Image (spheres, rainbow, N blue to C red):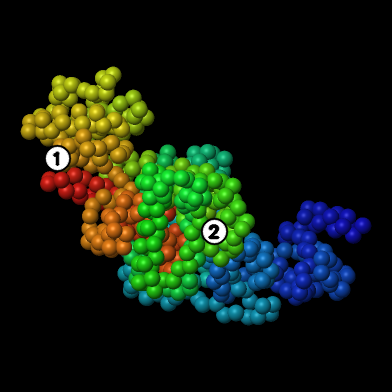
Amino acid sequence: MRSITIICFLILSWSIQAQEYKAHKVQEGETLESIAARYGTSVAAIKKINPDAANLTKNSILVVADYSGMQPDPVDFVMHKVKRKETLFSLSQRYNVSQTLIKKYNKQLYAEKLRKGDRIQIPVYPKPGEVVERPGLPVIDPMDDKIATHVVQMSEGKFGIARKYGISVAQLNAMNPGVGDDLKPGQKLIVTKNPTDKASILKDRRFAFYEVQPLENFFQLTQKFEITQDSLIALNPSLTDGVKAGMVLKVPNNELSAVGFFFTDNPMVNLEDSLTNNLVKELVVMLPFNLDRSSKDSVNLEDRFKRERLLNLSLDFYEGVLMALDSAKRNGISVNLQTFDTQQDSSKVANLFKANDFSNVQAIIGPLMNTTFDVAARQAEALQIPVFSPLTTATIGMTPNVFQTRTIDSLMEVKLMNHLDDRTETKNVIIIADSSAEAKKERLLTKYPVAKVITPRENSFIYQTDLSKELVDGMENWIFIETNQVSLISNVTSYLNALSDKYKAQLFTTGYNSSFENENIDANHLSKLRFMFASISKQVLDNKTGSFNAAYLKRFGKMPSQYALRGFDITYDVLLRLAAFGDVYSSAHSGANTSYLKSGFYYAKQPMGGYYNTSAYLIQYEDGLQLKLVE
């Protein structure tokens, strides 16, 4: 009967009151005072609605008026690092503040779940009856020509105002202490006349600015920019009051929506200079060594190692991992490494999580194969353990704890095109694409509508006359070759080399692959044609790589393969991120842009998945068979 009374009372109250009434289930240790503080009300108000509230017991139900959304501004903030199994509810209980208010001051929680390792700010409010002196606006010298006053217009928010004056929101807040996020028309804010931090102007190429047009609503905006309403509000908190014409919104950049990735303008950082976390790093590596088969094989183990490519790849990668541990140790980073054999078996991977305590593990590298990696990612998601996919891009779109370390191929295309933007007006563009590269050809034609197209003949070759009749003397010729066939690459580069004395030509590809490294491709031809492409690897040999090669040779008696180099780069980056930020999620949110022997890492969080590496390099052949890192 009591529950029916409560429900009827709630329905009646919601219909006639402005504030929100809630049914509160009393938890162990709660008092009327703590409950009143949580909802911004008084003990007397709770007793008035709940006459039997004086006899408070665990699990009893109270009806309370929730004034938490009408709280005064916080007097302070507590920085809290989220631990495993903590939730918004448990944090609201611990700090006596509503979940709504925690979200208010941690906008990312409107769109993302709370994760272990997240650093969030918890608002601290004055106790009932406590008088808090708030700082007024800073004293402004009217003669200071760098200071101006901005009058807030209808629908304006802090983000748009900060952008208008070339400052960050943090700077705007610092100049206007005590001013909340809900700005009112006519309100005056202190701003700078001259931008003091040009870098604060939006450079994140995932996003652009959009002015809301008359009659536009949430549905139209979410359709136009392919984003959910919650995510749009997370980017623009002012939308909580609805969509209004004239608003300037931060929205996804449609120019890059086809690939869903972006490049960063963040400078490269050396995390070795920022190591603050001295705790032992708990790392797991999962690789397909298939040791169970070794004891069953009658053949010599060494012969089997030579035969099995996957095993060799795993061993090379693991040797790179061990080299990374050596480098970490020299930087004072202690690591507890656990290595597991996945045996290329999904059920084996699932059993690893059942048989081992991974509760303290901070990162998992591997497995290599898609099917086993998917199982590991799902198992680790429940523990909020980040899982790094070493070599493949096939896992994109998976669980939010996935870190895709290999940049996707379509991003290589964007990288090259961005570099070539605004340089084609005086160029004669020629596209040579076989049947397997039709989509690439169409994208190039969209980019260069007046480009000439040469279609290879049935057995994938062209005649020299096919090429010479499209080249223009006295003009720079840009030739794009899109294929993975060695014969066509050799055919085209040979003819271009023969014609290079008469015509100025440069060769490009948006899809660099192993065929360009085939022994039948003359590197001298590529060098003469200043061949340019985008790659996940720096390709070039520098002092760091040379020192690593020497140390690797001394330890393992051979030169490192590309998989050993990748094993080192991925592992060392993970360990440095843990030592510099405490967890890899925070490192990704910080925008840390890193580069090592061959690979770079800049992780972007996708709305419906995990974190994906967007780092890529532009490489160009130079005279003397030298490779140049363009950017």
**279 and 216: which is toward the camera:** 279
Asked if 179 appears above or below 220 in the picture, the reply is below
Q: Give the total of numbered labels.
A: 2
**114 and 514: which is toward the camera:** 514
**106 and 259: which is toward the camera:** 259
Q: Is residue 427 left or right of residue 177?
A: left
Q: Secondary structure at mark 2?
A: loop
Q: Secondary structure at mark 1?
A: helix
**110 and 240: which is toward the camera:** 110
Seen at 69% across and 79% down, the residue is: 129
Q: Which amino acid type corresponds to the residue marked 1 in the rendered image?
A: Asn
Measured as percent of width and height from the top left, residue 146 is found at: 33, 68
Seen at 41% across and 71% down, the residue is: 333
Which quadrant is the N terminus positioned in? bottom right
Can I make out residue 98 in this image?
Answer: no
Seen at 59% across and 51% down, the residue is: 350
Mark nearer the N terminus (2 vs 1):
2
The image quadrant of residue 502 is top left
The image quadrant of residue 592 is bottom left
Q: Which amino acid type corresponds to the residue marked 2 in the rendered image?
A: Ile
Residue count near mark 2 (Cα–Cα under 10 Å), binned few <14, some 14–19, many ≥20:
many
Measured as percent of width and height from the top left, residue 493 is found at: 18, 32
Measured as percent of width and height from the top left, residue 464 is found at: 15, 23
* View extreme (front): residue: 298
- What residue does disc 2 label? 385
Can I make out residue 146 in this image?
Answer: yes
- What residue does disc 1 label? 524
Seen at 38% across and 43% down, the residue is: 307
The circle drawn on residue 539 is: none
